[in-house]
Amino acid sequence: MDISLQEVEYRYAAGSPFEKKAVENVSFTVSSGECVAVIGHTGSGKSTILLHLNALLKPTSGSVVIGDRTVKAGRKEKDLKPIRQKVGIVFQFPEQQLFEETVLKDICYGPMNFGVSEEEAKCRAVYWIKQVGLSEEILQESPFDLSGGQMRRVAIAGVLAMEPEVLVLDEPTAGLDPRGRKEMMNMFFRLHKERKMTMILVTHSMEDAADYADKVVVLHKGKKVHEGTPRELFSDAERLSEWGLGVPEVVRFQRMLEAKAGRKLPGICLSIEELAASFSELSGGKAT
C-alpha cells in the first residue's frame, strides 16, 4: 500500500494565540514494499509527520493519500478505523502502553478491537509472539513481570497481530544497548523482506538509516530538505552538518582510514564488509 504526502502543512493550536507551525509544504511518497527512513534533528517535524501516516493528525493544508483513502485539510473524515488497521505504528517505548493482565489478552486487544474473532486473535497472538522471538509460554504471564526487552517485544507483537500493510517505527531501538538494537532492527527488516511489508522508520540513528532504508527523507525546521538513497545522502557530510546531522560510524571510519592511507575510495561504504572489500581492492588485495 502506497502512502503519499502532498504539500502537507500542520499547525498546532491553529487559530489560537499559541499557534505553531510544525511542518510546511512536505511532500514525499512511500511506495508499497519500500523501506523509507525519515530523519532529522530534534524539532524537525518527524513526530508530526508520523502522526499523519495513519490519520491520527489531519493536515492543516495539503493532503495525505493512504492506499485508496485521501485525508484532506478542511474536510471531515468518516470511519478512519480501516486506515489505522492498515497502518500500524510502533511508538517509542511501546512497552509503556501495555495494560492487560496477561500477555495473551494484551496482544489480542488490538485485533479484537478491529473486529477479529477471539479465536482468530488468539491464533495471531501465538504466531506473532514467536515471530518477535519469545516463547508461546509467555502468553499466560503478566506483561509487568517481564524484562524491559520482553515487554517491548510483546508490545510490538500486539501491533503486528493487527497484520498491518504498513509498519511505522518511531525510534524503535531507543534505550536499547547495541546488541539489542541490532537484534530489534534485524527482526523488523526480516519481517519487511519476508512479508513484503512497507516500513517507515522515523529515527535519529544514521546507522539504521544507512543499514536498512531504500530511501531517506530528511526534515529540517519543518521542511523536507532532501530525499534520496542513503549512499547519496551520506556522501555529503558538510550538508548533513548544516542540518544538525552526522554520518554513520562506518563513514567516519572510512574517512579516517583514507586520511591515514593518503588515498580516497571511489565512493562511500555503508558497511564494514563493504569498506574492507573496497580497501582490499584499492590496495591490490593487500591490507593497508
Image (cartoon, rainbow, N blue to C red):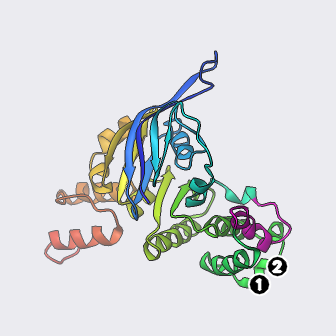
- Residue 119 disc label: none
- Residue 137 disc label: 1
Q: Is residue 44 highlighted in magenta? A: no
What residue do we see at 63% from left, 53% from top? 81
- Assess whether mark 1 and mark 2 are in contact (beta carbons under 8 angstroms): yes
Looking at the image, residue 147 sits to the left or right of residue 54; the answer is right
Q: Main secondary structure of the magenta part?
A: helix
Q: Is 220 drawn above or below residue 237 in the view shown?
A: above
Q: Amino acid at mark 1?
A: Glu
Q: Is residue 40 visible?
A: no
Magenta region: which residues? Answer: 98-115
Observer-nearest residue: 195 or 287? 195
Find residue 153 and report its image quarter.
bottom right
Instruction: Specify the quadrant that holds the C terminus.
Output: bottom left
Instruction: Specify the quadrant that holds the N terminus.
Output: bottom left
**Residue sitting farthest toward the left:** 284
Residue 3 location (% of width, % of height): 44, 52
